[in-house]
């Protein structure tokens, strides 16, 4: 990891965060532990954190961006009927 530049680290943080967040959101939705309204509220809140993260550095921005993207992806899948509760 010592040869990685900031961009590589940010990409790694983004991908790992997105994957974990996405898997968690899908599992919670399928199990009925979270609903669409809560997902949308959480996504809006994370959007605000993302905007603040612009000023806090690349890694924080990548992390928060991954959280927002995971929420948006799951919300879209629900609305398109591609993700349903078990």
Image: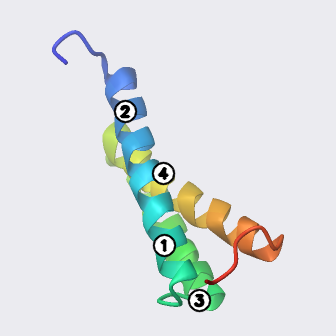
Residue identifier under label 2: 12
Name the element at disc 2. helix
Name the element at disc 4. helix
Q: CA distance from mark 4 to mark 2?
A: 11 Å
Q: CA distance from mark 2 to mark 1?
A: 23 Å
- Label 4 Cα neighbours within 10 Å, binned few <14 / some 14-19 / many ≥20: many
Q: CA distance from mark 3 to mark 4?
A: 20 Å
Look at the numbered discs 3 and 2 and tell me whether their residues touch, using CB distance below 8 Å.
no
Q: Along the polypeptide, which appears first: circle 3 or circle 1?
A: 1
Residue identifier under label 4: 66
- Which residue sits at x=62%, y=80%? 40
Q: In this image, 76 relative to 65: left or right?
A: right
Q: In this image, 25 relative to 73: left or right?
A: left
Q: CA distance from mark 3 to mark 1?
A: 11 Å
Q: In this image, 22 relative to 5: left or right?
A: right
Residue identifier under label 3: 35
Q: In this image, 81 relative to 51: left or right?
A: right
Q: CA distance from mark 4 to mark 1?
A: 17 Å
């Amino acid at each position: 990891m010592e040869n990685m530049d900031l961009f590589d680290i940010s990409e790694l943080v983004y991908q790992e965060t997105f994957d974990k967040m996405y898997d968690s959101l899908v599992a919670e939705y399928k199990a009925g532990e979270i609903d669409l309204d809560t997902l949308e509220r959480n996504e809006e809140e994370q959007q605000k954190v993302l905007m603040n993260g612009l000023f806090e550095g690349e890694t924080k921005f990548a992390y928060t961006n991954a959280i927002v993207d995971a929420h948006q992806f799951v919300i879209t899948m629900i609305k398109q009927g591609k993700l349903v509760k078990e």
